Amino acid sequence: MRTLLRTPMSERPAFERTESEERVTEATGPKIARVLDLTLRIGELLLASGEAAEDVEAAMLGVSHALGLDRCEPQVTFTLIAITYQPSLVEPPITSTRVVRRRGSDYTRLASVYRLVADITSEKVGVEEAYGRLAEIRRNRHPYPTWVLSLATGALAGAATMLVGGKADAQAWLVLLCAFVASVIGDRLAWLISTRGLPEFYQFVVAATPAAGLGVGLTLIGSDLRGSVVITGGLYALLPGRALVAAVADGLTGFYITAAARLLEVLYLVVGIVLGVTLVLYIGVNFGASLHPEQTFAQQSAPLIQLPASLALTLCFAILLQTSRQVLPVVTLLGGVGWTTFAVLRQAGISAIVATAVAATLIGLFGQLASRYRYASSLPYVTAALGSLLPGSVIYLGLLSFTQNEPIPGLLSVIRAAALALALAVGVNLGGELARLFLKIPGSGPKQTRGAAKRTRGF
């Protein structure tokens, strides 16, 4: 379906349908409207779950074609999806639209939608049965209860402290406990204000405050515990890696409006985190808190500590994204592969940006292979595996430099964090494209090839 998306409608090949396939082209208007509505509802669930715009359009095109509507043109933006059906050259087109108002991170529901799309495109499910399964998918509850998500948030922050601290002594375990408690408190506070209808921006501001406050408090009371590591661990639990990967993927595939909107969403969320942490750091520095940036990073590589920490961080991140229990082992292993690649390249003297890009490319490649094997989305396999590579430490160093009246080092740290984030997203997309470039399209004939991309020279 990606090949068809890149082909103008007038040049798309005619399909030979099986005898058992339901004919909709000769049906009445209400029948066509029902197929279009089903296609839009499926696209809405995919887009709301964070799927890339091109994949959403490909799924919509596959569903509409399988149900008998050949001359369809789907269109996806950040908040609006539409599909147009052209009955013939002499009849007016039929267009249906749907607005996406709510988004969530439920990869179990995303996998269920992909299974439904696979059954529809293989002609195993008709329109009415597809409606019933779609309603059941919407009714299904999340696989993990709220208290498990709160514990996973705290455990993620604790694992991040071990990852960046690189120690396993008694002090490191106390730092882990502090980060765990602070992140759980921040998660509960964010949930509380979300029930009052406050936007997500303020939820991130509130969620970032407890970890920063506890880190500054440990420094003010003269504790030997590393407050900087506590703050850094709290940042890892908040960084919007899912939205960043989707934004860059949309930009690289030519969906610039959707990519710009998603990048703006990422910017607002990061500004909320920055605002919450910076306010606490500014107050702490004015009260005499002496935060040492060199405490944040491990002085030397500690694979026996950092590798298990990266695996635990990936597992907790996958739980927060409501990933299916059957997928958790694969995702956790993939996160360990990514971190090991990054650590080996860093030990070899490769720059952090290049090492991050290579590790993310491997994650994107293996994630795409796993998703093709299961005929599912690659997001559940890729997004959580990137957790240990997110630039939480670099962002903290930039914020601390700004609060200590050191704008130049702070600006350099922010630029470096942006470069690392871009390397992550581009690497994941490159890995997925490599898989699509060299692998045969599932279910395609021997003559079907990858569709040509648009060629420009920048003007």
Image: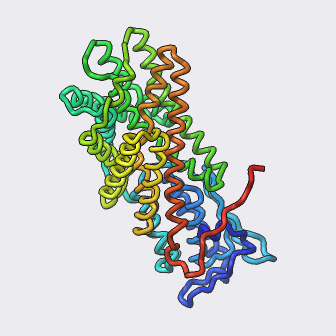
Give the vertical position of 351 relative to 56 (above or below). Answer: above
Q: Is residue 184 visible?
A: no
* Position in image of residue 198 (x %, y %): 49, 34
Give the quarter of the image for residue 227.
top left
Q: Residue furthest bottom?
A: 19
Image position of 457 (left or right of 58): right
Q: Which of 338 and 127 lies nearest the eye of the viewer?
A: 338
* Position in image of residue 120 (x %, y %): 50, 74
Give the vertical position of 270 relative to 69 (above or below). Answer: above
Q: Which of 333 and 221 lies nearest the eye of the viewer?
A: 333
Give the vertical position of 119 relative to 263 (above or below). Answer: below
Q: Which quarter shows the N terminus?
A: bottom right
Q: At x 71% / y 68%, what residue is drawn?
A: 94
Give the vertical position of 285 relative to 419 (above or below). Answer: above
Figure disc tally:
0
Q: Which of 415 and 101 lies nearest the eye of the viewer?
A: 415
Q: At x 58% / y 45%, what residue is drawn?
A: 262
Give the quarter of the image for residue 39.
bottom right
Q: At x 40% / y 63%, what residue is drawn?
A: 370
Q: Residue furthest right?
A: 90
Q: Residue furthest left?
A: 170
Q: At x 26% / y 21%, what residue is drawn?
A: 225
Q: Is residue 346 visible?
A: yes
Q: Residue furthest top?
A: 287
* Position in image of residue 333 (x %, y %): 32, 54
